[in-house]
Amino acid sequence: MANVAEKVGTESNWIDGAATPTRSVRWALASLSLATLLSSLGASIAGVGLPSLMQAFGASFQSVQWVVLAYLLAITTMIVSAGRLADIVGRRPLLLAGIALFTIASALCALAPTLGLLIAARAAQGLGAAVMMALTLAFVAGTVPKARTGSAMGLLGAMSSIGTMLGPSLGGLLIAGAGWRAMFLVNVPLGLLAFALVWRALPKDGRSGPGRSAFDTLGTVLLGLTLAAYALAMTLGKGSVGLLNLALLVVAALGIALFIVTELKVETPLVRLAAFGDRMLTASLAMSVVVSTVVMGQLVVAPFYLSRALGLDPATVGLVMSTAPLVATLAAVPAGRLVDRFGAQPTMIAGLASLVLGTFALSSIRIAFGIPGYVVPVLALSGGYALFQTANNAAVMGAAIADQRGVVSGLVNLSRNLGLITGASLMGAIFAAASAGADSATPSATLLGMQVTFRVAMALALFALVLAVFCRRAAARSKERPEA
């Protein structure tokens, strides 16, 4: 892991003109990279084990899917609160606590005698992952010089993609060799290593004194319940909208209204709503939601097109589908270097333009194009996503003030998670509606569903691109104003 971080930092001194050796920065990046990999691995490794869990516990799919949902819900509901808590008590101690919780919960998952206890342990594991996800970006902003923030963000993006890509294959190997418990047990030694690296490499930043603000408990509870209601509304029913989904959306809407009222009244709010007056921050979070929705749509819809329209077997579908995370992984570090060289906003616009091209190509796809007709657009889409994600993270975290980096990092990760949840539901529902009918499983119906879904995705990508161009022009005007 240290070698990966060292590779990113070898081109020049990370701390220009300072006496601090670059070796310390590389070790810090190694610790943050492993924490990032663990949180994404925890999300992706469990899915492949659901059939084994159904057999082991004699449970239905609807029951065992909560092994995945509990983890994702815990992250979604607690990631902003974890970031804010870190701003209060210190990032290093809370990150150590999060890694410890993740590691202990992983061991409890492996030892769980019942499905209920396994789901509870997975929720605890998700809480630890929420802390890790919220604080890795915040630590980069405070540890790495601004001139190299893009490269560091690219490294973390690559590690996240590696964890996502590695999960299914590693989980399958572990289950085949040692049973389903091994896919949770593997996190224990990795978690211990991450704990040791963070303890050794990251600077101490405990409490700054008696003036440290209090934690907004009421706001935390309201936001957690609101996000949980929204996440459940988007995930229950496999894309169909029923009375329960609508009721949960109403609860989420009421919850966000109560949360806003609460945050305006409390002395030390969880989220400073005035921060959303910063158009750049608001636009960055909105673009993150939109782009993540588009990317998740590709992951949800593509398997149906590859299997039903192109007639590929499951093994070939999996191989072709691995193109997207592979490209995102390979593009992440170069994307960071582009951010450092050309700036975050130009790189972001280039990434969104590539995303538009990819979605346009997928909306125009034909069965006669075969596998290349899918893979080539995905190269543009996934590469564009890597450029956007790295540039957007660098821009947002680079502009965050020191005592708000934790909560801003949490908001960045939350926007991504909400986009993924929305994409899985919204794009799946659009595909199902567009390909509906008695012959919905035929190649022609599947092709139509694919084309319609990506027309919507292209419109969303265009919206994000226009927003990015507007933000760049607004930033340029604000720089010119003082000179006038």
Image (cartoon, rainbow, N blue to C red):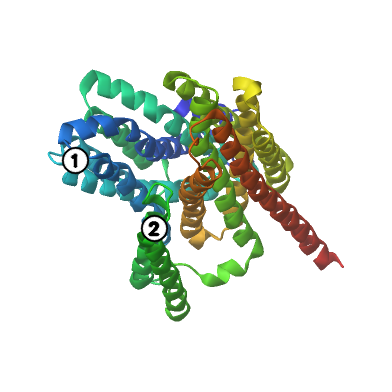
Q: Which residue is mark 1?
A: 108
Location of residue 232 by image quarter: bottom left
Q: Is residue 114 left or right of residue 94?
A: left
What is the x, y in percent for residue 305? 53, 30
> In the displayed image of the protein, which residue is found farthest to the front?
438
Q: Is residue 287 above or below residue 216?
A: above
Q: Amino acid at mark 2?
A: Gly
- The relative height of residue 391 versus residue 319 in the rendered view (above or below) is below
**Badge 1, how many Cα within 10 Å: few under 14, some, many 20+?**
many
Q: Position of residue 120 (x, y in %)?
A: 22, 48
Which residue of the protein is positioned furthest toward the bottom in this rendering? 265
Q: Residue 195: which numbered mark, if any?
A: none
Q: Quadrant of residue 112?
A: top left
Type of amino acid at the residue the image marks with label 1 = Leu
Q: Quadrant of the C terminus?
A: bottom right
Q: Secondary structure at mark 2?
A: loop
User: Which residue does the image show at 43% across and 19% down from the upper left?
Assistant: 315
The residue beneath circle 2 is 242
